[in-house]
Image (cartoon, coloured by chain):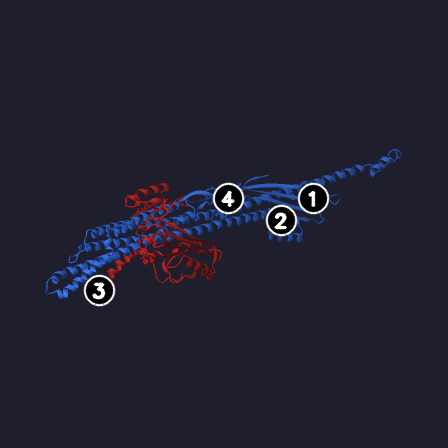
Chain colours: A blue, B red
Amino acid sequence: MFFSWYLENRYFKQGSDLKGQITPLLLLVLVILLIAAVTTVNVGRISLDKTCSANGADAGSLAAASSWAGAFNGLALMNEQLQMYYDMNYYTYGQLYFTANDYINEAIIYALLSGALAVAATVAFYSFAPACCTIWYAMLIGSILDGLAAWAMFEAAMAVSAFNLVAQYMLSLTDSFHDAQLEAYCSAIDSMQESYQASNKVGFSFVFSNSCIASKLNDSQADVYQAWMSADGPYSDKNYSWKDKINQNHSVSATLNLPNISSYTLQHTVGTYSQITGLLEDLISRSQIIAAVMNSTAVVLTTVAAFAMVAFISSLVAALCCPACLSIVGSAFCCPVMVAGCWLAYYSYVWGGLEHAVAIGILVALVAVGGAISVYLLKDKNDEAFEKWGPNGNQSSVSCGDASDLLIVKIASVVLPSWNANCCVTQRHPGTSAGIVSTSYPSIVSCSTSKFSGGDVGSFDNSYDPSMVGAN
Amino acid sequence: MHLKLLKGSIIGVVFSIFISSFAFGNISDIPLPSDAKMVSQKSANIGPSQSFIYNYETSISPERLRSFFKKEMVRVGWTEQKQGFYMKDGYLSMVVIMPSKDKENKTRFTISFSRIPSKEEVLAFSKDKPDKLNFMPVYPGSKQVFLWDLPTGVSASYEVEKDIKDVVFFYKSGMLNYGWLLVSEIPISTETVNIDCPDCQKSQNKAAPSTALRNVNMNKASLTFSRKGKERCTIRIFESTPGPQGLMDVSPTNDEAQILLKKTSILVTYYASKNI
């Protein structure tokens, strides 16, 4: 307006004492000064916002990394307990294994001894022809041998029964160890998941509390902001915006890239849980049957030994009465005794199955040898189960469910996409208006990276340590 | 009178020496490095036997310590078994060397030591009248074979002359009264086996009539219960019965043979919580 007036009046008022010619220039300078002032204020604000966003990003990444590193230190301790618990149970299982093996060796020796004694008894029975008025010494020998065979067979049955009990306890131990390790592993996964969320929350909380938001708010806005901070606002919203007194929008937003665990590598035993329990179940079932058969055989042997002893004693009585019976003097008393003795000896011989001495011998020998072989086969399975309890390979696991058939030794390692937490903060503020015209400047972005790996990740040394590794 | 007192005190001293040497095992049989210092000791019941655990520390490196035990244990009469176990006169021991050193740069190692119980000792745990359990019912008329502690609960075994179906039904219904929930079940399965000849079943359909250990039915089932989230109870049931042309042929007319074989074992594993 002033310039157009000047342009319009510069010729026809020549020579006149024109005043105020400097005004346009001054006005121009004023405008330039105003622009310079606004620019200076805005540049200052940019610098301030840059500092605030950088502080927020650094604090966010370092806080998240620190919290996450703490969680890994906790996991390392949990893992040490997993390993210790495995060692303890492995020793316990080993002790039971050797105890069980001891019983197996004992059972084999007794079963074979019983078989040999029973065969010897059979030879004694077989080499004998029953006849009245003779003393059946073979019955005495056979009875003693069969009695000893029965004792040895009972001992074998007892040893197999003891093995059965130990095998049952081994199965219980395997069950409880499996449940305990799985529970600990599942707790570790849950705990790490919770820690991951907590680390994110801590990171976002540090971002917003270090981004100079509070200093830009009036009292009532500050209260709202504090309530938002306390109510997990930073984690859930990731952005905070407000209006200033001239109704201009301000906002601070953040991103936090904290890598989560993508999988766990679990060290497990040679055999799976189902393989080991399957073997132990088989051991229990088979040893139960073997012990029962050996027990039955021992009962049969005892019965035979008893009949043989009755036959021997009866034959002895009959034989002692024979001379008297044959003479006229004592016949009235001795003859019935002799007849009764002969009768009892003979029927004991028949009822005891001694007339089929060979069949009995074969049966007992078969049970003894078969039992010894069966027990030896149990030993093989027992060895196999123990070997399967040893620590072996690794398996990747992403959840609790996929470890359900494993006997976990320890967590061998954890897999993450990276061991760095990356945080970026964006500050968006309007420029100063200086009461005349509104201005703006670009949003300010700052990023920061912190590592949380620290020491040796794979071996789970509890030395996870956060530190800042980069910022831009 | 004095003589009696003297006699009594001598017996008492001898008895207490015997008991104390038994209470913490005979660790003197195990060679130790000269600077080994005992840090702690404890005992734990492992099923039928008691185990003693001694924790030591030494300045010797783990590698040297390993070779020390390998050489010295054999020298004093221990026989090396599988997986680092040693055996001597019915005793069993194991040396575990910790992989990492402690803050004072000392190597820590643990010696576990136990006596192998005799079969009579193991079988002596049997009771005709089972102990009452507060967490589950006990099958009526059953015989308690053992009730032993586990690191995280209890292991109990019972025997009963009942059909496996009855036992399964009993626990399925009875456990509900104790607040348990059935979470998994392996139904009754039957396997006919030749105990002394595992491959015979595949090659021949009929067992030789004279072979006592052939054609035996092994029935088994398993029930797993859960309570209050963390508690678990696994009940495994085993039953052995004579199969066709199997044990029946030993004595076709003798019912006793069948009775002796018709035995159902119940194995209970109660998992309370991991306490480590």
Task: Determine the chain carrying the residue at label 2.
Answer: A
The first of marks 2 and 1 along the sequence is 2
Q: Secondary structure at mark 2?
A: helix
Mark 1 is surrounded, within 10 Å at the Cα level, by few (under 14), some (14 to 19) or many (20 or more) other residues, namely some
Residues tagged by mark 4 and mark 3 found on one chain of the structure: no
Mark 2 and mark 1 on one chain: yes
Q: Amino acid at mark 3?
A: Lys
A9 lies left or right of B157 = right
Write down the residue under mark 2: A237
Q: Are marks 2 and 3 on the same chain?
A: no
| Residue in front for this viewpoint, A281 or A446 | A281
**What is the x, y in percent for residue A465?**
50, 44
Please say if the residues under marks 2 and 1 sit with CB atoms less than 8 Å apart: no
Lateral position of residue A141 relative to residue A284, left or right: left
Marks 1/4: CA distance? 45 Å
Mark 4 or mark 3, whichever is nearer to me: 4
